[in-house]
Structures are given as structure tokens and as C-alpha cells.
């Protein structure tokens, strides 16, 4: 019983990180129908920016460091959109996808060359003592940082939900997702809306990167693997849907944790990608997504 | 079309050198250069001029030409965005490695030249068949989707193939496959590359292959003309996979050591960079893209290590930058949709 609860928390922690990445994929896809292959590497970059800030400014408390790293990563995300993607907005779809691949490899190699290829861990910014209450009542050994990572991630997702559903810019984002051509005619600044989307997505990914670096470890190539996992989660939930991305992330994390705990950790990736292919074939619009009609 | 139609019985303008002749001339020229080159490097003649390193570079170029040209069939002529080419390369490499080490006698036990030829034909044929078979099966499911989803599914299969090999212990698992005999040399790669180019050139210009271009241009119109889209796409996928398997088989017997990790997403992206540098739907572009990319990377490495050794690794940043700049400035690549004359079917066609 206690191990099951512990595994549940492990899955929730991994799922929270997946969700923070998956939201960026889903929002960008929802708005400009672009699969941003570089998003996993933005997540990696966020982790390394967090690492840099903790090592250079050790005095900085975690609750100041997290927003600062998110802000910096958001700036990088917006810059990439401005420099590399905006000019291709009306070009062939695949040209942009290839550009995102190039940006991703560029970021990986840049971090590898400047910071080094080693696996690192972000120094603890959160208390790592076990949660006494859970230990006494459920017999589960869960540390505070794990619980806090889950809670802060959920809070960030709640803020995102409020921004998208309750603010003017959120309304504009949903409108662009609905009809990209008509919205500029209503006086909405399309470039601004897309830039804000990239900023939010990158900031959330940075939070994910820092959490991942605290809970596990970071290396320059982690964006490929985790980015793809998060993307799978977004597809499972229905790409373009915020609730779907969160739901899919926790589901995928659950499947992975079960696979590792009861089968073999070597099968983890195979099962995740097998799940993706199966889903794309039988249920391509996912749990929360809307089926699209094929226009002739 | 805009010019005045020729008189009814006028003979077609005489062609000085039909492209078929040109093609054979180019093949003969390359082989005539490759054979003495290989022999003199093997014999250790002129070690200062004929460095084995240059031959190694040419071998890599030849193998990459096979990979890029076959991917061009899918991404260029068929117009789909397939992202899993390295997976088929892995299938071919492991099949050839298994055949060469477990099933066949070593080249030393057979007559010198003929024995190596037989081994190569068997291993490479096995690699192509295996890759084609797996490509056919994957194609059956893959082409139920198009566009973004097709890209994701092919990449997913690439990851699954790599993951499966990592879990197969009899091929070494994640540690890799060691002790593969070196049966491939530059001459074998050159012959294979020329065969690939010739086959692809004829295929693409045949009525069988023009169907692919018709699907790219307008799938609905092609379907109305009686083209079975699923079948045609799967043929293209199977053929491309077979050639990727061929390149993998050559690769394994040239490098003598393979690991699953060398066939993942990063390898696929490298193939893509060369493909887009050269240009879509152009075999000439594939050749030029591979040569330009390989030479550029080697040049950068030599220049950087000569003048600024501490920056030698920074060339890793160049290849993604090339990709981004091509996409931003010249999306057709160096030679998109154009062919050198020796790769064209006939003048004006």
C-alpha cells in the first residue's frame, strides 16, 4: 500500500513536469498549427538557466529564482520566434517544422559547448525533509520538495487557465486559435498574441526544467527525450487543448512509472512511443481534442 | 507549350549525347578513378598524396549519398515528411552485421576477390530485404496519416527500432555490436552509390515513379486518375527503406562497430540537413548536398583545429545554422527540382 502511494507521488511529479512542457506544445500548436520541435530544448535551456542562476547567485531564494529563470527563458523563446519562425509563418508548413528541428539542435549544441556535456543536478532550493503527516497517516515516504514541485506546478497551470480563460490576451489567443485570418481584421495584434503564446510556453517549460533538475538531473540532450514524451502527452490529451495536455501528461507519467516499477526500465521509451503510434492511428484527436473535418 | 507547334512530320531534334550515354560515361569515369585510387591506397603507394583519410571521407560521402537520395524519394518526390530514415539504416546495419559474423564464413576462407564480392552481395542483399520488409510493414500503418502526424509516426518508429535493438541482447544491446569484419571499401561503396542513383533515376522517370510526383502535386486528382495512393506511397516507402538498409549494411561493414545510439534522431536530422541543403526532388541536389556538407564540416574541423583548437567543437553549431538559414532564405536548397544532365531522362522531358 505504502509503495503504491509513493509510486503515485512519483508519477504525479513526473506528470507535473510533462504537463509544464506539454502545455507549450499544445498552446503553440493550437494557435499557429506548428509542432515546435525545439520546445523540448527550451525546457532544457530553462533548466540550465536555473542552474546558472543558482550557482552564480546562491543567495537568491528559490521563489525569486524560479520566476527570474522563467522570465529569461521566455525572452529566449520570444527571440527564437521573432528571428526564426515569424518569417516562415506563411511559408510551407514543413519549412517551419524543419527550422524548429534546426533550432533545437542549435540549442543542444550551444549548451553542450558552453556548459559541458556532463549530467548535473540543480542544488536543492526546496526543503528535502520527508512530509511527516504523510508518513504517519499513510506510511508513505514523500519528501517536501516532491510535494512542493507538484503543488507549484498545479498552481502555475491554474494561473495559465485563468490567463487563457479570464483575460483579454487569453481571449485573443483563443480567437487566433479559432481563426487566424479573421482576428487581425478585428484589430488584434497577431504578432503580439503569438509572441505572448511563445513567452508563456517557454516560461512554463523553464519551470519544468528547473523542477526536473531538482528532482532528477539535467544534461544538454534531455530535451529530445523529455520533449518527445511531453509531446506524446499533449497528443494523448488532444493537442491544442490545455486541459487535455495536463490530463495526458499525468496519464503518460502513470503508465511510465508502472512500466518501470513492474516491467523494465528499458521498455519505457518503446511503450511510450508505441502508445503514441496506436493513438494517432485510432484516436488522433485525443481525449480532449476536437475531431477536425477533412476539407476537400 | 507557348511556342508554335512543330510541323507534323518534322523529325525530333537530334541529340548529340543522349542522357543514357552521359550516365554511363559518368559511371565509367567514376569507376575508372575509384579502382586505381582504392588499389594504390591499399598498396600504400604515394602515402603523402593518397592519404587513407581522404578515401575514408569519400567512403562516407558515398554512403551518405545513398541515404540522402533514398530519403529524397519520400521527402522530395513523394512530398511527405518522413523522419525515421536512420531507423531503417539501423535495421540494415544490424542485419548485415549478423549475416557477416554469424552466418557467413570469413573472407579469408574464400577466394580473395570473389569471396568478398559474394559476402557483400549476401550481406547487403539481406540488409536491403530486411529493411524493405520492415519498411513495408511500417508503411502499412504510417500512410493512414499525412502531414505532421506522418512525421511524428515515422520518428516514433525510428525510436522504437532503436529501443528494440537496445533490448536485444544477442546483438549486444545498448553496448553495441563489435567485431564486424571490414568487407566494405571505397570501391564497393562507389559501385553501390552509382547503382542506387541509376536505379532511382530510372524509377523516378518511369510511369511507375511518376505516380509519386502526381500524388505530391495533387493527391485527389491522382486518385481520380486511378492511382492507388496507399499502394504507391507504400512502394516508395519500401524502396526508400531498402536503400537505407543498403547504406546501413555498408556502414556496419565499414565502421566495424555499431551501436543503437548512432541511428537515432540525431542521425536522421543529419540526413535531413544534407537533403535540404542539396534540394528537394533532385538527385543531383542529393549528391551536391552530401558533398558540400561533408566537405564543409571537414574543412571547418581542419581550419578550426589549425587556427583555433579551443573552438574546434564549435562547428557543431554550424550544421543547424545552415539548416535554419536555408529554410529562411532558399527553401529549395542548392538544386531543388533541377537535375544535372546525366541524371535527366532525356532532353526536354
Image: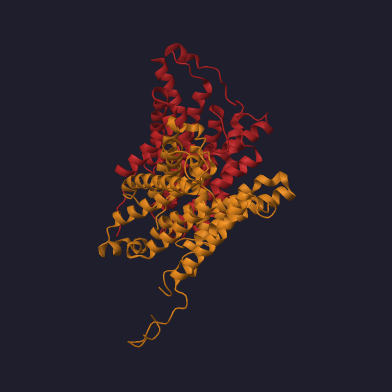
Determine which quarter of the picture holds residue B14.
bottom left
Q: Position of residue A61 (x, y in %)?
A: 63, 29
Q: Residue at x 55, y 61 (%)?
A: B32
Of residue A145 and residue B20, the one placed in the foreground of this image is B20
Nearer to the camera, A97 or A51: A97
Q: Residue at x 39, y 22 (%)?
A: A262
Vertical order, B65 against A108 (above or below): below
In the figure, the red chain has which letter? A
> Where does the C terminus of chain A fall, quadrant-wise?
bottom left
For the N terminus of chain A, the image quarter is top left
Q: Is residue B284 above or below residue B320?
A: below
Chain coloured orange in the rendered structure: B
| Nearer the observer, B259 or B49 | B49
Q: Is residue A280 above or below residue B210?
A: above
Q: Position of residue A245 (x, y in %)?
A: 41, 39
- Would residue A165 be visible to someone looking at this image? no
Amino acid at each position: 500500500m505504502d509503495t503504491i502511494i509513493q509510486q503515485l507521488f512519483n508519477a504525479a511529479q513526473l506528470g507535473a513536469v510533462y504537463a509544464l512542457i506539454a502545455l507549450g506544445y499544445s498552446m503553440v500548436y493550437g494557435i499557429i498549427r506548428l509542432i515546435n520541435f525545439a520546445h523540448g530544448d527550451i525546457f532544457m535551456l530553462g533548466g540550465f538557466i536555473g542552474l546558472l542562476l543558482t550557482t552564480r547567485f546562491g543567495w537568491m531564494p528559490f521563489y525569486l529564482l524560479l520566476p527570474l529563470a522563467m522570465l529569461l527563458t521566455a525572452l529566449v523563446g520570444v527571440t527564437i520566434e521573432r528571428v526564426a519562425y515569424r518569417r516562415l509563418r506563411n511559408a510551407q508548413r514543413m519549412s517551419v517544422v524543419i527550422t524548429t528541428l534546426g533550432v533545437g539542435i542549435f540549442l543542444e549544441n550551444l549548451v553542450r559547448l558552453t556548459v559541458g556535456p556532463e549530467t548535473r543536478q540543480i542544488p536543492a532550493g526546496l526543503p528535502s525533509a520527508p512530509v511527516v503527516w504523510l508518513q504517519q497517516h499513510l506510511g508513505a515516504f514523500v519528501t517536501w520538495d516532491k510535494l512542493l514541485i507538484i503543488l507549484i506546478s498545479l498552481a502555475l497551470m491554474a494561473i495559465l487557465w485563468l490567463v487563457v480563460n479570464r483575460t483579454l490576451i487569453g481571449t485573443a489567443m483563443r480567437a487566433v486559435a479559432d481563426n487566424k485570418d479573421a482576428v487581425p481584421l478585428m484589430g488584434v495584434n497577431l504578432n503580439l498574441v503569438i509572441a505572448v503564446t511563445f513567452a508563456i510556453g517557454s516560461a512554463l517549460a523553464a519551470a519544468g526544467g528547473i523542477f526536473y533538475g531538482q528532482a532528477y538531473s539535467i544534461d544538454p540532450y534531455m530535451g529530445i527525450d523529455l520533449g518527445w514524451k511531453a509531446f506524446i502527452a499533449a497528443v494523448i490529451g488532444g493537442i491544442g487543448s490545455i486541459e487535455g495536455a495536463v490530463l495526458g501528461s499525468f496519464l503518460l507519467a502513470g503508465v511510465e512509472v508502472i512500466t518501470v516499477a513492474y516491467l523494465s526500465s528499458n521498455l519505457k521509451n518503446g511503450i511510450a512511443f508505441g502508445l503514441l503510434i496506436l493513438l494517432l492511428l485510432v484516436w488522433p484527436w485525443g481525449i480532449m481534442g476536437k475531431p477536425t473535418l477533412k476539407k476537400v | 507549350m507557348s511556342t508554335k507547334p512543330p510541323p507534323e512530320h518534322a523529325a525530333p531534334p537530334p541529340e548529340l549525347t543522349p542522357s543514357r550515354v552521359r550516365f554511363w560515361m559518368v559511371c565509367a569515369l567514376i569507376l575508372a578513378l575509384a579502382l586505381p585510387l582504392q588499389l594504390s591506397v591499399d598498396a600504400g603507394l604515394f602515402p603523402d598524396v593518397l592519404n587513407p583519410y581522404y578515401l575514408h571521407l569519400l567512403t562516407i560521402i558515398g554512403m551518405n549519398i545513398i541515404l540522402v537520395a533514398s530519403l529524397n524519394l519520400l521527402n522530395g518526390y513523394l512530398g511527405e515528411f518522413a523522419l525515421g530514415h536512420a531507423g531503417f539504416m539501423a535495421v540494415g546495419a544490424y542485419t548485415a552485421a549478423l549475416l557477416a559474423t554469424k552466418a557467413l564464413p570469413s573472407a579469408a576462407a574464400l577466394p580473395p576477390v570473389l569471396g568478398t564480392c559474394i559476402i557483400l552481395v549476401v550481406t547487403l542483399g539481406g540488409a536491403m530485404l530486411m529493411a524493405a520488409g520492415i519498411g513495408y510493414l511500417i508503411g502499412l500503418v504510417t500512410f493512414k496519416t499525412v502531414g505532421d502526424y506522418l512525421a511524428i509516426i515515422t520518428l516514433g518508429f525510428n525510436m522504437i527500432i532503436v529501443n528494440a535493438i537496445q533490448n536485444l541482447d544477442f546483438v549486444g544491446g545498448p553496448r553495441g555490436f563489435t567485431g564486424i569484419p571490414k568487407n566494405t571499401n571505397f570501391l564497393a561503396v562507389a559501385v553501390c552509390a552509382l547503382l542506387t542513383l541509376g536505379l532511382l533515376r530510372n524509377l523516378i522517370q518511369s510511369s511507375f515513379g511518376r505516380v509519386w510526383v502526381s500524388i505530391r502535386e495533387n493527391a485527389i486528382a491522382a486518385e481520380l486518375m486511378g492511382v492507388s495512393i496507399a499502394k504507391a506511397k507504400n512502394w516508395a516507402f519500401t524502396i526508400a527503406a531498402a536503400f537505407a538498409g543498403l547504406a546501413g549494411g555498408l556502414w556496419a561493414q565499414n565502421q566495424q562497430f555499431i551501436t543503437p545510439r548512432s541511428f537515432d534522431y540525431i542521425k536522421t536530422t543529419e540526413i535531413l540537413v544534407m537533403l535540404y541543403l542539396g534540394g528537394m526532388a533532385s538527385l543531383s541536389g542529393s549528391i551536391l548536398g552530401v558533398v558540400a556538407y561533408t566537405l564543409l564540416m571537414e574543412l571547418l574541423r581542419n581550419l578550426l583545429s589549425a587556427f583555433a583548437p579551443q573552438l574546434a567543437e564549435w562547428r557543431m553549431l554550424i550544421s543547424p545554422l545552415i539548416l535554419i538559414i536555408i529554410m529562411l532564405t532558399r527553401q529549395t536548397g542548392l538544386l531543388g527540382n533541377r537535375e544535372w544532365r546525366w541524371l535527366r531522362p532525356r532532353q526536354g522531358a
